[in-house]
Structure formats: structure tokens, C-alpha cells
Amino acid sequence: LQFYWEAITRVNYVDSDICTAMRKAGCRTVIFGVESFSDRILKTIHKGVTGAQATNAILTAKKCGLETTCLLMIGNPGECQETINETVEGIKAVTPDHVDAGLTVILPRTELYDIAVKAGFMDDSYWLDESLSAPVFTLENPLDRLHAFKTAVFDAHWSNRWYVRLYRASGLRKVR
């Protein structure tokens, strides 16, 4: 049987041998839960990996002929312009085929939830209203700054594309 498939994994679970075997078995895309290229953020969220490991895993997968997707979280505790810049530089360095960046949300029974409750941002009654979705973690950064961070990440991703570079070279500044 020959069929194509994709995988989602952590950056510390792949190496050249695994990526080669995956490609031979029909895998075409590997989705990595990178979260951030900032070691400070990765340590804060207890990810157990480094930005260098993320870089290595993505470059290894690409070298083996796999498409790559980076899943990122914007706005974790400690997020600031410096940590976003590290993520932007990481995206530029590895040029993944796809990037999906979401704002960090607060979910019950997590460390982030405990931080939000302790700060008075929310309490257990929040979840009584079933129409509400999980709130974005805005204790350290307002929503407009988080959206600006997210835009910077997507700009870094899209600026790696040849057609965007060509478009910009023609005199236009940004593509949205």
C-alpha cells in the first residue's frame, strides 16, 4: 500500500534516520510543536527542549525531503520583544514551509490558570458561562501588543518566500 501521511511531534523526537524512514514510508509533512525559539520561554513553560533543538529538528526534516510546519504560542509568561525577536530569528533561520502561531490561552488546571487566579485575573466562576472561550493570557502584555508580536512572527515567515521578496522588490512594502 502506498499512501501519504503527516505527523505531529516534538523537536526532540526526530533525527536524520527517523526522518528518512518517515519519508520512505510516505510521510510528507512533519508538524513540530515548537512553541517558541526562545530558550527563556521554553524553560518557563517547561517544554524540556531548546531553541537549538527546534532549529536542528526542522532543518533535519527539510534535508530529508519533508515539509515542515511550526506551531508557535505567542504570549507565554515572560514574553517580551526580546523573546519574540528570538522566535522571529528562528523562523528566518529555518524557513519552515508553514507557520501557525496562536495566542496563549488560559485553561483550567494548568500552571497558567493558577497564575491568573492568583493575580485576580479570573476565578472558577469564569467557566460557568458556557458561551465564553478560554481567555488569552494578557497579564503581562495587552492584546494589541500580543497581536503585534504575532504579526512580527508571520511577517518573518512570509518574508522568506521568494514571491514576497519579488513583490517587495517591485516597490511594495508589505503583503497582508
Image: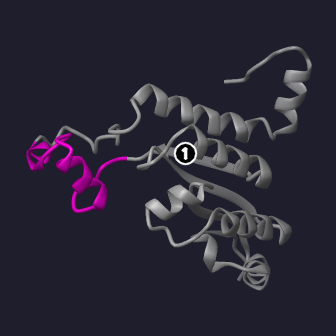
Q: Is residue 78 left or right of residue 29?
A: left
- Quadrant location, the C terminus: top right
Q: Identify the residue at horizontal 77%, vertical 55% (top origin).
A: 94
Q: Is residue 174 left or right of residue 165?
A: left
Residue 171 lies in quadrant:
top right
Relative height, residue 132 to residue 73 (above, below): above
Residue on which the image places disc 1: 101
Relative height, residue 19 to residue 126 (above, below): below
- Quadrant location, the N terminus: bottom right
Relative height, residue 161 to residue 11 (above, below): above
Secondary structure state at the residue bearing disc 1: strand
- Examine the structure image and report whether residue 125 is included in the region drawn in magenta: yes
Q: Identify the residue at horizontal 75%, vertical 68% (top origin).
A: 56
Where residue 43 sits in the image (x, y, percent)? 50, 64
User: Start and end of the magenta stretch?
Assistant: 105-128
Where residue 98 sits in the image (x, y, percent)? 68, 49
Q: Amino acid at mark 1?
A: Ala
- Examine the structure image and report whether residue 116 is included in the region drawn in magenta: yes
Front residue of 73 and 31: 73
Where residue 166 sits in the image (x, y, percent)? 90, 27
